[in-house]
Image: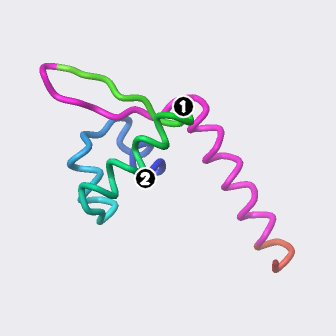
Amino acid sequence: MLAAIQRKGEMRPTHLMYKANLAHRQLKHYLDELVQKELVKRTERNGSEYLLITDSGNRFLEKLKEMRAFEETFGI
């Protein structure tokens, strides 16, 4: 979910729901957790809700990328 938002820059929740292939209830649960952990923030523009990845969310994805590279390097 974070990577999808990062790629688009900003994304409407409905588009993320389709992109992540999630039911509305699942999306709401996961988004609430991401917002609570300050990895994603909600914003409103022209009466529509948009999701933005925060600096913390970007750092999290970068660390995850580093961990995956480490895993591949050492065959873990």
Picture residue at 26% right of the left edge, 43% below the top: 13
Q: Is residue 30 magenta?
A: no
Q: Is residue 20 above or below residue 59?
A: below
The numbered disc on residue 65 is: none
Q: Is residue 49 magenta?
A: yes
37 or 54: which is nearer to us? Answer: 37
Q: Secondary structure at mark 2?
A: loop
Picture residue at 51% right of the left edge, 30% below the top: 54
Query: Which quadrant of the figure has residue 8?
Result: top left
Camera-near label (1 vs 2) is: 1
20 or 31: which is nearer to us? Answer: 31
Disc 2 marks which amino acid? Met
The numbered disc on residue 38 is: 1
Quadrant for the C terminus in the image = bottom right
Provide the major secondary structure of the magenta segment: helix
Q: CA distance from mark 1 to mark 2?
A: 14 Å
Q: What residue is disc 2 on?
A: 1
- How crowded is the residue under tag 2: few (<14 C-alpha within 10 Å), some, or many (20+)? some
- Most distant residue in the right direction: 74
| x and y percentages locating residue 9 in the rendered image | 38, 36
Q: Is residue 7 above or below residue 69?
A: above
| x and y percentages locating residue 71 in the rendered image | 78, 70
Q: Is residue 2 above or below residue 48?
A: below
Residue 58 vs residue 27: left or right? Answer: right
| x and y percentages locating residue 51 in the rendered image | 34, 34
| x and y percentages locating residue 46 in the rendered image | 13, 19
> Magenta residues, as a range?
46-71
User: In the rendered structure, which disc, 1 or 2, sits on the residue that comes first in sequence?
Assistant: 2
- How crowded is the residue under tag 1: few (<14 C-alpha within 10 Å), some, or many (20+)? some
Query: Which quadrant of the figure has residue 25?
Result: bottom left
